[in-house]
Image: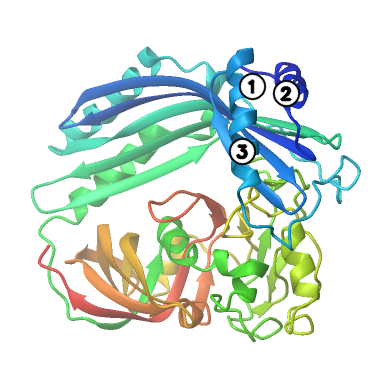
Amino acid sequence: MLDKNQAADIFERIKKHSTADEVEAIFYGGRNALTRFANNTIHQNVAEENISVSVRAAFGGRTARATTNKFDDESVKRVVRSAEDLAKVQHPDADLLPMPDAGRSAGPTQAVPSRHFAQTAAITPEQRAEVVGKIVAIAQKRKLTTAGIFSNSESVEGIFNSRGLADWHTQTSSEVSITMLGADSSGWQKANSPDVANLDPIALAELAARKAFHSAAPREIPAGKYTVILEPAAVLDMVGFMFYDFGGLAVLDQRSFLNQRVGMKLFGGNIDIWDDVAHPLQSGSPFDGEGIRRQRLLLVEKGVVKRLVYARATAEKMKASEYKDQVGLIEPTGHGFPVPNEMGEAPMNIVFGAPEDPKTIDQMIASTERGVLVTRLWYIREVDPYEKLLTGMTRDGTFLVEEGKVRHGVRNFRFNESLLHMLSNVEEMGMPVRASGEESFDMVVPAMKVREFNFTEVTKF
């Protein structure tokens, strides 16, 4: 797989062919493999290896990109020419900044742990198949049908520019997703980690099977406002809808729920949220799409929104805007996407603060007189962007809790719930864990016990 020295040699050839004022190259890709199973059998095993380079040329206030996955000299010359031809026909952008140099990219230093694990990269199809066989055996023991994936990957991300910036990141990833299906019930579990040693597919399969088994013959209970116990995956897929609004450009564009709200208490006093790329449960590169080092930021403290994140150009625009006195500290934070883009920036390494008195899910259940235990949510959509009112459905393990015990499975609900309301009504939390869902990126979040969660309809299943 491509390493930093090889990428640096390719960038030297890119510079040689370039006539632009400035040139940048972003390398990305790697190798990934996946084993997919359904109906208690493997039906797909695929592997792919691909590395691409995205070349950005800049002439004054004009810039554009072109991409290739071929690194012979003619292909390199062609992609540089394409980027330059595209840049020359762009309208000038008065907000376009010079590319950062190596010194300006450094930022506050953080000790980011290694995220490349040889044992993850070396997983073979036979090893994945062996794990799937054990998952299937668990399903068959319970007279269930299982489906899901087991995947592993090894990836690179690097950035070079003509002002001397050169940075490189390698990472591995492993993921298991398991659904267990009964005649009228289902259970689900999913986990992802750079280190496959952190995954326990058998424990995940056992838990998914128990959820499917114990939610069989679900009963209908009426819609309404309930105390809910949200497992981490359900929390993740809800809260993921708000973090793109923490970007400075979203506020400038008036598309953020934080407009006129930075510095206000929007959530309960037990809610602290960080963006922390160096957290041991996080993943990803320590630099952003321009090569700026990512800062560790306290976004929410005791329910109060403290900070926004900024790409370099957004920070300059914000300083000159009518909002400059309403948004707190303004500076590049290392959260920008590759230029040019329409999104600006976003925090992508979300970590919820640990509660003073963390509770297990079993303890949350034991303290609940009447409520609903939710494994996960799906088909979530935004209804009101400013109040962060979301609608969606429960799935794959929804249970009635009464007098401190899980009583039986219930038919799924549709919900209409505001994130502002939800995060203001958190009664108990667990220790934050690395969680995976289907509607958002992985985060470090806790399970939550939330009062007055609004279920509006009951489904037929």
Say whether disc 2 or disc 3 marks the residue closer to the N-terminus: 2
The residue wearing badge 1 is: 77
In the image, which disc is placed on residue 85? 3
In the image, which disc is placed on residue 444? none
Report the side of 441 relative to 77 (left or right).
left
Q: Look at label 3 and name its amino acid.
A: Asp
Q: Look at label 2 and name its amino acid.
A: His
Residue 28, image x, y percentages: 59, 31
Report the side of 455 relative to 66 (left or right).
left
Q: Is there a contact, CB below 8 Å, between mark 2 and mark 1?
A: yes
- In this view, the residue farthest toward the right is 103
State the separation of the CA atoms marked 1 and 3: 12 Å
Q: Is there a contact, CB below 8 Å, between mark 1 and mark 3?
A: no
| Above or below for 276 versus 103 | below
Residue 348, image x, y percentages: 60, 54
Q: Residue at x 39, y 35 (%)?
A: 176
What is the quadrant of the N terminus in the image? top right
Residue 43 seen in the figure: yes
Front in this rendered view, residue 319 or 189? 319
| Above or below for 339 versus 320 | above
Q: Residue at x 16, y 66 (%)?
A: 411
| Above or below for 434 versus 172 | below
Front in this rendered view, residue 171 or 251? 251
Q: Is there a contact, CB below 8 Å, between mark 2 and mark 3?
A: no
Q: Look at label 1 and name its amino acid.
A: Lys
Question: At numbered mark 3, what does the secondary structure look like: helix, strand or loop?
Answer: helix
Front in this rendered view, residue 54 or 359? 54
The residue wearing badge 2 is: 17
